[in-house]
Image (spheres, rainbow, N blue to C red):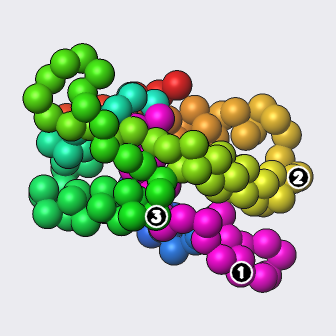
Amino acid sequence: MVRPTDAVEYEQMLLGRHDLAYHRGGRHRHALMERSAYILLSRIRVQGPMTNGELSDAFGLDASTLNRQTAAATRAGLAERIPDPEGGIARKFRITDKGARLLDEERERVVGSLDRIMDDWPDEDIAAFAAYLKRFNSGIERLSRRPWPRP
């Protein structure tokens, strides 16, 4: 017997192979930023400045992996280290103006791709799909004990 989760697994696998930000009508475009930087900056934007330890906990990544990602974002001018605004000892990462601008541009590219993909969907279907995705992600976050703040 095939379970409904078998179909979810297959479709989730297929979704993971798509790169929505860079596909337009059969043509691929170059990324404005690495996927890891996009996710990292998105988290910092929603939560505010974060330490390496906070980011490591939030993403479930070891410190060396997180250090490579934050170092790359810093070298690219997308993030910067600042003293803790709350007076703590550890330094925190925040988004630079350049990082915020590129993050906004990247998000617009993704939304534009989604607009093209869903151009024949009624708004109610898009809203329902978004609600199911949020519910799915929230279930993963609950099991991993790593909730993602939402704007």
Pair 3/2: label in front: 3
| Horizontal and vertical percent position of residue 38 | 49, 55
Contact check, label 2 and label 1, Cβ < 8 Å: no
Question: Circle 2 is placed at which residue position?
Answer: 120
Could you tell me which residue is drawn at 25 percent across and 43 percent down?
55
Give the x, y percent position of residue 28. Answer: 71, 81
Q: Nearer the viewer, residue 90 or 125?
A: 90
Q: Amino acid at mark 1?
A: His
Residue 34 magenta-drawn?
Answer: yes
Gap in angstroms between the C-alphas marked 2 and 1: 22 Å
Residue 55 lies in the magenta stretch: no
User: Which residues make up the magenta segment?
Assistant: 20-45
Q: Is residue 4 visible?
A: no
Question: Farthest residue in the top direction?
Answer: 86
- N-terminal-most mark, 2 or 1: 1
The reply to whether dot 1 and dot 3 touch (C-beta < 8 Å) is: no
Q: Residue 17, relative to residue 58: is it above or below? A: below
- Amino acid at the residue labelled 3: Ala
- Against 77, is 22 above or below? below
Q: Secondary structure at mark 1?
A: strand
Secondary structure beneath dot 2 equals loop
Q: Relative to the observer, which residue lies in front, 38 or 129?
A: 38
Q: Residue at x 48, y 53 (%)?
A: 78
Residue 18: in sight, yes or no?
yes
- 4 in relation to 32, above or below: above
Residue position for label 1? 28
Eye-nearest disc, 2 or 1: 1
Q: Residue furthest front?
A: 83
The residue to which callout 3 is attached is: 76
Q: Residue at x 71, y 77 (%)?
A: 29
User: Left or right: where does residue 136 sit relative to residue 65?
Assistant: right
Q: What distance separates the C-alpha of mark 3 from that of mark 2?
A: 38 Å
